[in-house]
Structure formats: C-alpha cells, structure tokens
Image (cartoon, rainbow, N blue to C red):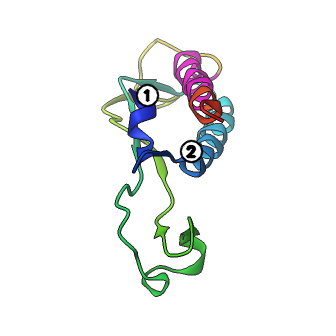
C-alpha cells in the first residue's frame, strides 16, 4: 500500500523515495545523539506534491526545485516528527525516571521505515 502512495501516473517516484531516505537517515543520526530523549506516541509526517501539473520554476527558489522531466517541477518531499504531547527529555520534569541512551523504540521505527523504503525503491527495476 505504501508503494501506491509513492506512485503517480503509474510511475513509482524513486526520486521522492531517495530524498525521503536521505532525510530519515539524517533524522536517525540526530536521534542517536539525543541522550535521554523519548518520543512516546509521536509520529512521522511524510509530505510530497503528487500533482503532475506544471509548476513554474520562478515560483520557487532554485534550491527548492527539483527537475523531474522536461516540464515537471515539484517541491521536495519532507519528513517531520509530529505529535510531541508525550515526549520527554532530561530535566523536563522532576520525575524519578531517568532514561539512558537514545530512544531505541523510535530508532527501531526509523530503521524499519528505511528498510521498507529501500524495498519499494528497488522494486520493479
């Protein structure tokens, strides 16, 4: 089903998946350095423009435009962490619970997403 999400006009958007993979890997490296942070009940939001309508190059700054063919331009895809209501970090409250190391559950989820995106990107090649 996720593969269908990344398919536009019958074409798998490998460029979108590659960009998302780079962003998730960067997120993974950052979370690895966050000692004691916990992202309970947080989610990842993945956004990309799926409209095949032509968008003028002048409409976006050069670093925000990706060329996807002779007349197709779109904003780059984005991955964001959302739903921070239950997140915590050292010093957030005076609780007795001290979390050591990075959030292994969140990192597990990122690793699974990387694996799934790689499988989708390599399919039908």
Q: Between residues 107 and 113, which one lies in front from this camera angle?
A: 113
Question: Which residues, given as a range, are shown in magenta?
Answer: 102-117
Which residue is rendered at x = 60% and y = 74% of the image? Answer: 63
Nearer mark to the viewer, of 1 and 2: 2
Q: Between residues 19 and 39, which one lies in front from this camera angle?
A: 19
The answer to whether the residues at label 1 and label 2 have Cβ atoms under 8 Å apart is: no
Q: Between residues 44 and 3, which one lies in front from this camera angle?
A: 3
Q: What residue would you read off at disc 2?
A: 20
Q: Is residue 90 magenta?
A: no
Q: Is residue 111 magenta?
A: yes
Which residue is rendered at x = 69% and y = 36% of the image? Answer: 29
* Distance between the alpha carbons at the discs numbered 1 and 2: 26 Å
Q: Main secondary structure of the magenta part?
A: helix
Please rate how many residues cluster around mark 1, counting C-alpha atoms within 10 Å: few if below 14, some from 14 to 19, many from 20. Answer: some
SS at circle 2: helix
Q: For the N terminus, which image quadrant?
A: top left
SS at circle 1: strand
Which residue is rendered at x = 48% and y = 70% of the image? Answer: 72
Q: Residue furthest bottom?
A: 58
Q: What residue would you read off at disc 1?
A: 88
Percent coordinates x, y for residue 59 in the rendering: 42, 83
Report whether 93 appears left or right of 31: left
Residue 71, relative to residue 82: is it above or below? below
Q: Quadrant of residue 99?
A: top right
Residue 73, relative to residue 117: is it above or below? below
Percent coordinates x, y for residue 41 in the rendering: 35, 23
């Amino acid at each position: 089903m996720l593969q269908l999400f990344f398919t536009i006009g019958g074409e798998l958007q490998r460029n979108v998946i590659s960009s998302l993979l780079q962003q998730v890997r960067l997120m993974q490296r950052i979370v690895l350095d966050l000692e004691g942070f916990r992202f309970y009940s947080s989610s990842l939001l993945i956004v990309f423009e799926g409209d095949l309508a032509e968008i003028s190059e002048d409409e976006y700054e050069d670093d925000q435009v990706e060329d996807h063919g002779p007349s197709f331009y779109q904003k780059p895809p984005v991955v964001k962490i959302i739903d921070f209501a239950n997140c915590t970090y050292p010093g957030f409250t005076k609780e007795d619970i001290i979390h050591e190391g990075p959030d292994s559950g969140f990192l597990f989820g990122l690793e699974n997403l990387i694996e799934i995106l790689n499988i989708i990107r390599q399919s039908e090649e």
